[in-house]
Image (cartoon, helix red, strand yellow):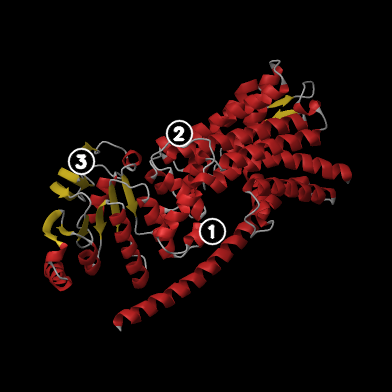
Amino acid sequence: MNSLIITSIEQGLIFAILAMGVVISYKILNMADLSVEGTFPFGAFLFAKFISMGMNPIVSTLMAFCIGTLAGLLTSVLFTKIRIKPLLAGILTMTILYSVNLKINGKSNIPLFSYDSVFNLGNALVVLVIIVLIIKIILDLFLKTETGYLLIATGDNESLVRSLGKNSNMYKTMGLMLANGLVALSGALMAQMQGFADITMGSSIIVVALASIIIGDTIMKNSHKIENTTRAILGAIIYKIIGGIAIDLGLDPQDLKAISAIIVIAFIFYNNSMADLLELRKRKVELRNAKNSQSVQEF
Amino acid sequence: MLKIVNLSKSFNTGTENEIKVFDNLNLQIEANKCTAIIGPNGCGKSTLLNLIGGSISPDQGQIILNGKDVTKLKEEERAIYIGKVHQNPYMGVSPSLTILENIALADKKGEKFTLRRLIKRKNMDRYIELLESIDLGLENKLNTKVKFLSGGQRQSLALLMAAMKHPDLMLLDEHTAALDPRTSRIIMKKTKELIEKYSITTIMISHNMRDAIEYSDRIIMLDKGKVVLDKPSKSLTEDQLLDIYRRRFEESIA
């Protein structure tokens, strides 16, 4: 049981990086960027390529991040320049990446057991905690900068960004690049943890990311003190622990994906029905106010 | 001063639905004055404001702001000289950010956005002073998210954010239309105070004749893209203006 928890936390930490990436596209920019399904294995295959070329595992992992940002650039160009809707733009990038991933090493599965990994640096859990904390701190600091706030404002209200004299598309591009870079980094770490890169490892990864974010959001829901990054990290870890325990209790691992999807559906349904309820109440109040002001005018 | 020279704009050009909104429109808007533009829906008020603001571009003609031809400038490049307040109070703010964060963002308008912290201690007193100037107690709610404010408070904040960097031109697009009558009047008063305090040349679109008379220096009435009335506001009473408006537009509907 103990080792199960530790493995779940380790995997949760890797997915935490994925979830922090998706926080940028989904929560901050308000875009459902499906390209991450391709970017996750993209990072894994890039890592496999660089490590097999004899590069240091840290450099290979960082290279996966840097080149992974290009996936975000592609989606952004499709979206902002060719004006393809974000959902389709993401799917197109994902489709392109599928072929690219197969081309990088010429194979759909690359064993990595014989190569060094960042986990050789020390205890895997400690290494992961350090990596996740560094990313979280940098991201939190970035979101407090002038540029970071403009990124948030872009997702919130593009016309405000333009009125400040800035091109909002540039900030969307920046956000998508950063998001995809983090997802690729997460994929590179996953490849090192499991000892291979595989073409299917990105399949429905967006659901895992969304499930993590949604679970994270329910932790002390009304507290504004918890950052989105902290929520994503906790959400990813809890998600993995729940999944680990469920499998340990006899759940067929093949059912896990459906259950993740159901978690996402249930939480979104809950949030939306709450929102509808609030909206209904608000409308009633507004209607009453409008009636009042009308009667004042008539008077 | 704003000069509009031979401005033409059509929509759906080349189709059977072609609409010619402006055909060689010429207009001069005096500096440091508030000009109200009135007219029924479809007369070209909003198109004119969008052309000036740069969210759409003209087919031909020039828009000259304080001697500078801004026609070719993109919306965001032009925004440095222009403040705009929309009908929807959400359009001028970032709802998920706090009041303080919104003010700090607006304070950087037209400047370079760097990797330095946005909220700086040294600016706090100035932000508080600015918020105090609109007299809504927002200075005591610095860390409240803007989405939790009332429509009137949000629009006051949007107004302050648009005006605080002293733009050359302020565009008010029916900015009180979505508010209740009382709040609408308060916002109009605050608008007047702010544009007078910062001496900003202002163009205001309004459907409210009383506001147009009371708060502007000059009234321009548009009909099908043409100026059909152009008078100093003080030379008209609300009844006279309503009468002209009704005769022109309501009879034609009947």
User: Which amino acid type corresponds to the residue marked 1 in the rendered image?
Assistant: Thr
Residue at image coords 23%, 61%: B41
**Chain of the residue under the numbered disc 3 shown in the image:** B
Q: Residue at x 59, y 38 (%)?
A: A36
Mark 2 vs mark 3, CA separation in Å = 33 Å
Badge 3 is on which residue?
B64
Quadrant position of residue A133: top right
Label number found at residue B144: 1
Q: Helix or strand or loop: what does disc 1 sit on?
A: loop
Q: Is residue A67 above or below residue B117?
A: above
In the image: residue A221, left or right of residue B218? right
Among the 4 quarters of the image, the one containing residue B191: bottom left
Judging by the rendered image, the residue that carries numbered circle 2 is A77
Spot occupied by residue A295 in the image (x, y as percentages of width and height): 34, 82
Q: Amino acid at mark 2?
A: Val
| Placement of A238 over or under A91, stated as above or below | below
Figure quadrant of the C terminus of chain A: bottom left
The residue tagged with tag 3: helix, strand or loop?
Answer: strand
Name the foreground residue: A100 vs A53: A53
Separation of marks 2 and 1 at Cα, in angstroms: 35 Å
* Foreground disc of the pair 2, 3: 3
